[in-house]
Image (tube, grey):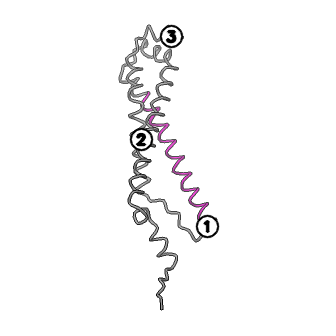
Amino acid sequence: METYNVVNTEEYLAAMTPATLTPAFNIALQVVIGIAIVIGFLVIFQSMYTAVMERTREIGILKSMGASKTYIVMAVLSESGLLAIAGTALGIGASFALSAILDNRFPTLDFVINIPYVWKSIVIALVSALLGAFYPALKAARKDPIDALSYE
C-alpha cells in the first residue's frame, strides 16, 4: 500500500518560503530591490535638481544677502531629508494599515511586517534622499549671485 504524506496548513506554508521554493528567487528579489533603490535615487536627484533650477532667483537673493555655501547646501539637504521622512512615514504607515486590513479580510493567512526590514527601509530612504540631493545642493551653492538674480 502506498504511503501518503499528510501535512497541515502551518507546515505547508512554512515550506513555501522563498528560500525553499527556489534559491534563484532570493537573487531575483535582491536585483529588483537594487533596481528600485537606483530608480528612487534618480527620482530624488531629478526632483531636487528641478527644485534648485526653479529657485535660482531665491538662491541668488540668499547669496546676495550673505548666505554661505554651507547654508544653502544644508537648506537643500534639509528639504530633501524632510520629504524623505514624510514619504517614509506615509509608506510605513500605509504598509501597516494594509497589513491590518488584509489580516481582517483573510484571518487564516499571516501578513507579517518584519521590523528589521522597516529599519532597513528607513535607512535606505534617508541615505538615498541625501545622496540624491547632494549634487543639486552643491550646484545651488556654487551659483553666482548676479547670474542667479538675472535668471528668469
Residue type indicated by callout 1: Phe
Q: Residues within 10 Å of mark 1 (few under 14, many from 20)?
A: few
Q: Residues within 10 Å of mark 3 (few under 14, many from 20)?
A: few
Q: Are marks 1 and 3 in contact (CB under 8 Å)?
A: no
Percent position (x, y) of residue 65? 43, 13
- In terms of depth relative to the viewer, which is nearer, 105 or 52? 105
Percent position (x, y) of residue 39? 46, 38
Residue 84: in magenta span:
yes
Range of magenta residues: 76-103
**Residue linked to disc 1:** 106
Query: Is residue 111 found left or right of 130 in the rendered image?
Result: right
Residue type indicated by callout 3: Tyr
- In terms of depth relative to the viewer, which is nearer, 36 or 126? 36
Residue at image coords 41%, 38% = 128
Helix, strand or loop for the magenta stretch, by majority: helix
Residue 101: in magenta span:
yes
**Residue linked to disc 3:** 151
Q: Secondary structure at mark 3?
A: loop
Mark 1 or mark 3: whose residue is earlier in sequence: 1
Residue at image coords 47%, 22% = 52
Q: Are marks 3 and 2 in contact (CB under 8 Å)?
A: no
State the residue lying farthest toward the bottom.
1
Residue type indicated by callout 2: Leu
Query: Is residue 100 found left or right of 40 in the rendered image?
Result: right
- In terms of depth relative to the viewer, which is nearer, 42 or 140? 42
Query: Is residue 110 found left or right of 18 in the rendered image?
Result: right
Q: Which mark is residue 126?
A: 2
Q: Secondary structure at mark 2?
A: helix
Q: Are marks 1 and 2 in contact (CB under 8 Å)?
A: no
